[in-house]
Amino acid sequence: MQISSIYDTDPVRWKIRLAGLLEFLREHGERRITLRGCRVLARLTPEQLSQPGVSLLVATVRGQNGRQLAGVSFVSGFGKDASLVAVHPLYRNRHTGTALLSAQLERLGSLECTVACDNTASLKMCFNTGLVAVALNDGPTGKPTLLLRSPFLPGSPSITLPQEGELLCQNPS
């Protein structure tokens, strides 16, 4: 499997490639990709890909007819605007999504995303990547949704873990 960045300066080729990626997300996103995230991707221009916090990656595998798309990951605003991952069913449970998300984290330096609590495959992918849950909110469909972040997201309060021998609970009296 090869993970690579998508970038195309030719407007016609860019629109065709973007349409193909959106179709892949619709077909293999298991109806769990947010409409908001798809809209952000649909409006993406090649110029925006050079902005900090924006990245579009694909995972491809070598097939009989050349390279075939196995997965797609898109992040905008370090994940605050959009964070999407979809993997073709033939390549699930092979750490394809984890590899894509890890590559995004390595590329961007920090990342955050929201995942519905009933989406165990996506939660596993995020935890395998090293993201940590920092909040529980209601998602766009009203489902309980976890906010996950890379451990040291700039601007977020740092997490202080108890040291060995330190009291975990203190008596308020």
Image (cartoon, grey):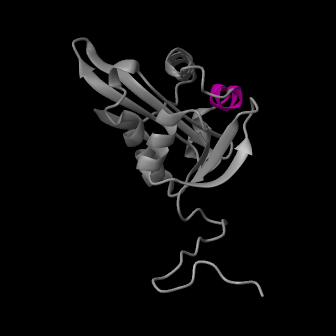
Q: Is residue 25 above or below residue 96?
A: above
Left or right relative to 64: residue 40:
right
Left or right relative to 95: residue 114:
right
Tally of numbered tags: 0
Residue 52 in view of the camera: no
Give 69 or 147, whichever is nearer the viewer.
Answer: 147
Furthest toward the top, the residue is 65
Q: Is residue 5 above or below residue 86?
A: below
Q: Position of residue 104 (x, y in %)?
A: 47, 46
Q: Which residue: 37% across, 41% down?
A: 99
State which quarter of the image contains the N terminus: top left
Furthest toward the left, the residue is 64
State which quarter of the image contains the C terminus: bottom right
Q: Position of residue 36 (x, y in %)?
A: 71, 30
Give 134 or 16, whichever is nearer the viewer.
Answer: 134
Give 30 or 171, whichever is nearer the viewer.
Answer: 171
Q: Position of residue 25 (x, y in %)?
A: 53, 21
Magenta stretch holds residue 36: yes
Q: Which residue: 42% across, 28% down?
A: 71
Query: Residue 37 falls in which quadrant of the image?
Result: top right
Q: Is residue 173 above or below residue 8?
A: below
Q: Which residue: 57% across, 83% down?
A: 167
Residue 120 in view of the camera: yes
Q: Is residue 92 above or below residue 65?
A: below
Q: Which residue: 45% across, 83% down?
A: 164
Magenta stretch holds residue 34: no
Q: Position of residue 160 (x, y in %)?
A: 57, 75
Q: Which residue range is magenta in the image? A: 35-43
Q: Main secondary structure of the magenta part?
A: helix
